[in-house]
Image (cartoon, coloured by chain):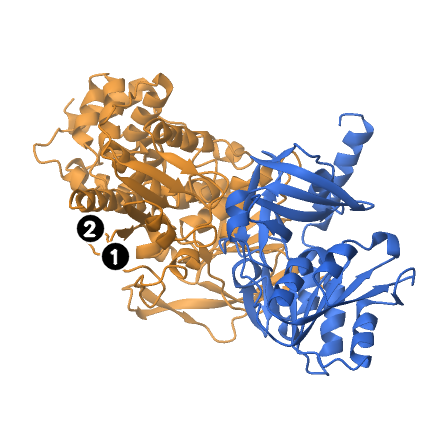
Chain colours: A blue, B orange
Amino acid sequence: MYRIVKKRLLAQGIALLEVEAAAVAAKVEPGQFVIVRVDEVGERIPLTVMDFNREKGTITIVVQDVGYSSAIITQMNEGDEFQDFVGPLGVASEIEKYGTVVCIGGGLGIAPIHPIARGLKDAGNHVISVLGSRSADLLILEDEMRAVSNEVVIATNDGSAGVKGFVTDGLAKVLSDGHKVDAIWAIGPMIMMKAVVEYTRPLGLKTIVSMNPIMVDGTGMCGACRVSVGNETKFACVDGPEFDGHLVDFDLAMKRLAFYKDEENRAKARLECHHEGGHH
Amino acid sequence: MAANKIPRHEMPCQDSKVRAHNFEEVALGYTQEMAVEEAKRCLQCKKPLCRTGCPVEVLIPDFVKQIAEENFEEAARILKVKNSLPAVCGRVCPQESQCESKCILGIKGESVAIGRLERFAADFGMKSKAAQIEKVEPSGKRVAIIGAGPAGLACAGDLAKAGHAVTVFEALHVAGGVLMYGIPQFRLPKDIVQTEIDTLKKMGVEILTNQVVGKVTSVDELMENGYDAVFIGTGAGLPYFMNIPGENLNGVYSANEFLTRTNLMKGYKFPDYATPVKVGKNVAVLGAGNVAMDSARTALRLGAENVYIIYRRSRDEMPARKEELEHAEEEGIQFRLLTNPVSIEGDERSWVKSLTCLRYELGEPDASGRRSPVPIPGSEFEIEMDTVVVAIGQGPNPLVTTSTPGLELNKRGNIVADPETLMTSKPGVFAGGDIVTGAATVILAMGAGKKAAAGIDAYLKTK
């Protein structure tokens, strides 16, 4: 079993969990993910890694209460255990010295961008992080991102912190400040990643995105995580999760995320019903 | 009556109309009386050809004799001498093309129902817990096995019997491989698989789940960390798709995904189990092997009204076992033969709406010796469909092979192993099962696992 040693609420419905998983922590690299299962009846849920501590043997994940399983996970507490915790999975980010790199994290996407920004900074890059959220109170991990970035630009939809607008507006600010950007990592909701690649495509700026499709085993066995990249079908679990954003078919990816929307709603409604019944 | 005049005993099954709507086991197994009567048909040949048809050389006449004499526990014990998973093999082996195909009785009449007797004896042994674990002298050698599927488990069983300390590394959260994620509950109950695996654990086999070798550790690291040999039995875990338009629409599954959601994750019990699987009214399964039959029959049990097997050749060329074809047909699976999909159409929400197919006719024999399917120009037609399951086979999973420098692969990505010892191009590293042969059967993988165990044992004795 994999015990939660630390829990911190980052914002309404967003929890950070530090979990004992020594074998995973020994090997994980920025950009990789884990698959967790809460209990015997749980789904296998892919989650990108926010942080890792090789000495302590822990992996830190950040989960937002958006569906059935994520609702259960965000309510887990210190001392609770995951039934299963598998990883590291996927291909690690290509960390090398590019020069100036922009790391864009939108919403929950700030969590997986964190170890990538740190890796890029350690590799000698000038890292400018662009962090986006709907509003200031939903902005997560700002201090952690400042610690691994040379500069930080914040964008909120309502203007309650930083630039008013989207992460693309934050990126526009970075570019208008005269930075010559050599590479961009963008992680967040599909619609955000799509907006970023549409923005950078005409500028010819290399943009890496991290796909988060539906998965089951995470080892290439089931093919649920198919993404179309440059008109070729790739499996995000073994070929990704990172791809050249300019080649990804985001419209398809967004539609595929809705595969189990009805079932997800049904399961979540049932869970809420249980809570109201006072079973928890 | 002379033994060869007694007719072969049929296997009692759940009624096809009832079973098409539940996940309980289809075949019910022999009663003691039936098993004894069937066992008495065996001629106890001096040179038993049946054994030559068995990839793991089960002591067939010996265990059958014990059943005939009503010594069921002894029959179970004899089975286990050569076969670590007899309750599994009694259910999923293609006996008709193996042991039973060599039976002398089969020349003029019907062969002894060896598979059904194997199942009977194995189940009896499980219930009576008679199978005593014999203590063996530890050899002091350690072997790592990658993959807890049929090849890995068979290899583990034989190595443990030889006194070696065995650790099995399994990527999924339970051991069993295709026996757990692939073959459905109604053909192979999962508690049977787990009971067989528990026996291996009692023999001292250590099984570590959630260990993706190639990621969390590697073959080279295992060797550096004190394992004296490694066996790779990672199987054929990379699904093929048809590469036709529309294959990424919602509602299109690989058979692996469809079966994994249903079997391993128990999607048929959603929402009590959290993993969903959905089929709608009309389901097309592309392919006609055992995996296709499993997918089709699973779709029916999940509530589909019409389930089609779409196959471009004719019935005679269908690769599935005859028994599986018959069971599928009895349950109401509809065969659309000499038919091949050309595209999948979606609705505005990107969901499968229909399947466009082309009709075929049979031409001259091709390289496989089967008459080749030839498309009939202009014969396109469209069938309404909610779900498409692609069951056209799978390739070797690359996680271990690509993370092991110096491991020789063939052009298809399968590992090259010595045909006798199953040692790979890396000394001390052995491989067997689907990762070597390409997708085949449970019993062939088990045979390879046993062969590798012999190869490993011999190798360890030279060290």
Q: In the rendered image, which quarter is residue A273 located in?
A: top right
- Chain of the residue that carries numbered disc 2 in the rendered image: B
Inter-mark Cα distance, 1 to 2: 8 Å
Q: Residue at x 31, y 38 (%)?
A: B156
Q: Are marks 1 and 2 in contact (CB under 8 Å)?
A: yes
Q: Position of residue A144 (x, y in %)?
A: 73, 55
Q: Out of B146 and B49, give the one closest to the viewer.
A: B146
Task: State the mark number for residue B291.
Answer: none
Left or right position of B177 against B252: left
Q: Nearer the viewer, residue A139 or B244?
A: A139
Amino acid bearing label 1:
Ala
Mark 2 is surrounded, within 10 Å at the Cα level, by few (under 14), some (14 to 19) or many (20 or more) other residues, namely: many
From the top left corner, tell me how far across and down residue B278 is, in percent.
Answer: 63, 47
Check the image and report above or below for B350 versus B44: below
Residue B316 picture location, percent across and down? 34, 55
The x, y position of residue A208, in whole percent, is: 64, 70
Q: The numbered mark 1 sits on a residue in which chain? A: B
Question: Looking at the image, which residue is at 74% across and 37% down?
Answer: A75
Question: Which residue, given by chain and number where applicable, does mark 2 sit on?
Answer: B421
